[in-house]
Image (tube, coloured by chain):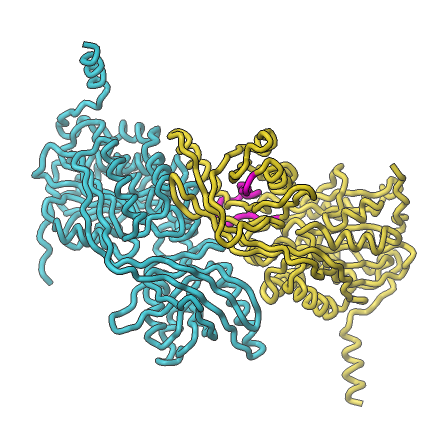
Chain colours: A cyan, B yellow
Amino acid sequence: MKTRLLLAIAALALPVPLLAQDGQAHDPAALQQKALGDNTAYSIVEDLTTEIGPRLAGTDREAAARTWAVDRLKAMGFANVRIEPFDMKTWVRGIETAEVTAPYSGNMHITALGNSASTGARGLEAQIVYFRTMADLEAAAAGSLKGKIAFVSHKMTRTQTGASYGQFGDVRRRGPNIAASKGAAAIIIRSVGTDYHRNPHTGGTNFAKDVTPIPAAALAIPDAENLERMITRAARDGKPVTMKLVLTPRQIGTTQSGNVIAEVPGSDPGAGMILIGGHLDSWDLGTGAVDDGAGVAISAAAAKLIMDAGTPKRTIRVVWWGAEEVGIFGGSAYAQKHGAAGHALAMESDFGAGRIWQVDFRLPETADGLKTKIANALAPMGIGRSNDVASGGPDHGPMVALGVNAIDLRQDGTDYFDLHHTPDDTLDKIDPQMLRQNVAAWATVLAIVANDPADLLPKPVPAK
Amino acid sequence: MKTRLLLAIAALALPVPLLAQDGQAHDPAALQQKALGDNTAYSIVEDLTTEIGPRLAGTDREAAARTWAVDRLKAMGFANVRIEPFDMKTWVRGIETAEVTAPYSGNMHITALGNSASTGARGLEAQIVYFRTMADLEAAAAGSLKGKIAFVSHKMTRTQTGASYGQFGDVRRRGPNIAASKGAAAIIIRSVGTDYHRNPHTGGTNFAKDVTPIPAAALAIPDAENLERMITRAARDGKPVTMKLVLTPRQIGTTQSGNVIAEVPGSDPGAGMILIGGHLDSWDLGTGAVDDGAGVAISAAAAKLIMDAGTPKRTIRVVWWGAEEVGIFGGSAYAQKHGAAGHALAMESDFGAGRIWQVDFRLPETADGLKTKIANALAPMGIGRSNDVASGGPDHGPMVALGVNAIDLRQDGTDYFDLHHTPDDTLDKIDPQMLRQNVAAWATVLAIVANDPADLLPKPVPAK
């Protein structure tokens, strides 16, 4: 009797699974208010960064994060919580030191880039050849770098949109392959970042199949500028600058990664599901708070607000992606396995936890009414509508390429590249109030799209 | 003939050594204007941080800095440039790593404190005992820390004056000795700093003669806060947190340090000299730009402005002090060798390169007119007069204790403890315009004091 009574009380306290008629249960303004007082997202990123910490793709730490994620998503009440595993080639960091040996001296703060080769434990000492920009490196004669360490500088611009990562990130993405193809023994770059701390920015690079990988690393920005000053002075005296590099990362072969999936089942499976998420893996230097603990937290917290308010028409599928940083392996594995069919929309949060200030759409012309509804609901939050075409986020790129619609809630990234891929990506960089603003914007969009009558099912992409 | 002509032209280009009557050659307002357009200080700190870099007291790098300093001060035209050497006991850094081993995992950014003992290369793994404040550590029972790692947190306050370094610095200065005396195997502290970067703050500590030194190190602030979160969570589950520490610093015995001295000879040796400077040694983690490349640069640049304008009445003695960071060994050696006699005033710059906003005096009552003259000349720069008693700066403490007068030009230190004793103390943190404002204020004070008729010779300090 007593037990029955307790169960009855417990049932009353549970969120009532309303069958919403056109989203009556999901009033955007009410959800915004609720989100602005909700600490769910912050507690996810706090727990993830404290209990798991760094979680490099393909490693035991990423696996520990998946186990943690399944427990957390189940505890939050999501349905169909599961891992979809996939295999990947995995690279891990080793020792990393850099020391100017002549004509000056000094240790420099450096970090290997993903897929960097090793110098061996004894290291490599060589003359530095300086390139002020990526274009200068590209213009170097074939073979001219034989036995040398190429050093590419390249000052990145701070922007709200993060647009400059496209251009300046190229030094990291393509520079090592170019230097290797010109015979360099190693390459060091000025970190792709906008801060002035002794924290180098890592990130992935790739070598072409016919190019032998070389050691490739990034200097912290104060170190890169000091090295430039040394090079300028030494050149005046006609002297080369030499550096000793020790970098011992390794390719450890094939290991397992995976995507963690959780769902808010909708009342109308035929309307297509909404795919949302962030990536669970992080670079190994920080604890992955802004990249992308924030993204997994924001997307799941918003989905939970919808779930707790009632059953939406469309299913919301939350995916915490694996192995994004090292090549969007999780997003590619998912697209290959599932295809576009049945996916109405994709939204990802993977640009930190700054204030959302703009919404971009990639929706069919027949959904113009939906765009207006969303823009009007976001406007009171100071979020403007743009004419930019939404990307859907890095992990959803393969799905968007297959014709899936997308909406981007754009975060203010002015400070994002101070932290991106550095040891400094830690919990203290997240402003809880900004995180709640993100969740409020996400809940607003989900409340509308999850119940909208527009036909959002993907149309076959015409063959080229 | 040709040579003679060239010499004559060269002589015309040299600063004319005017014999100033009451400082007519040293108009404060004119010197302020000149200083605000003068790049001398910035070029000193740029060259020192680039060509020498870190210069830990007692090491070869500090010796290299002295050689560099003698060349530089001679090239600037100072007289009687020389080194006054002294012996000291020297400590050097080794490997330093920290890893949480249970119930969570993760590498933490850590650095040994000066005079820390070594854990040995194999390291030390032990349970952490957490103290929220220094007072809590002091209250721990004797023997209660046996075999444990004490962890003391203690959040430092950001202030313009730097006053909170007094209280919060105590964790670093006295904490290790207290922990050792209670039987701790090691101590880690939250860095004494105000930033949120993964750059731990080093600094000196001391052990009493009857206390065996233990490994003592500081965690970067984000790491300290993460460790606190781990401890809180683990305590909820009744679990201890364990850490593996590897710290291998060494005491290398007696080595040589020294003070570098340079002078602007005055026309009236009987009026007493003005002792100014900053310290040449730096901690080894950064390149010693704000602590204290800025100070040596500001003091010397201001003295050069005076020298170039004409001969002052009082001699100005510039001292770039050795071994300040590890115990004010240079200042003590100087006071012991020279005593107070013949020293009219002491002024040091050792608080970065922030804007000067206040002037403090320690002058005899008979010099009230001098104070007013100085305050009136600084007022147009927005520098206010205070009732605080000037300290003369750390290196001049031993001289001030002997009765030497002092003036402090107080810098804005709001951001100083973001950088203090960290790898982040690099050239890019210095704002050239603020540095020039410092030189302008210094030149103003020197122009007045160096020519003032007041009797500033030290009076014997009464025996207690």
Decide whether the magenta segment is chiefly helix, strand or loop. loop
Instruction: Name the outermost residue toward the bottom.
Output: B1
Q: Quadrant of residue B284?
A: bottom right
Quarter that holds the C terminus of chain A: bottom left
Instruction: Tell me where the magenta segment starts and ends, as one range.
Output: B184-203
Place of residue A137 in the rendered image (x, y in percent of width and height, measured from the top left)? 39, 73
Q: Residue at x 63, y 45 (%)?
A: B205
Asked whether B130 or A126 is in front, the reply is: B130
Task: Decide whether residue A116 is among the magenta residues.
Answer: no
- The vertical placement of A233 against B449, above or below, is below
Res. B38 in view = no
Q: Is residue A181 left or right of residue A87?
A: right
Res. B397 in view = yes
Q: Residue at x 27, y 29 (%)?
A: A31
Task: Decide whether residue B190 is among the magenta residues.
Answer: yes
Q: Quadrant of residue B103?
A: top left
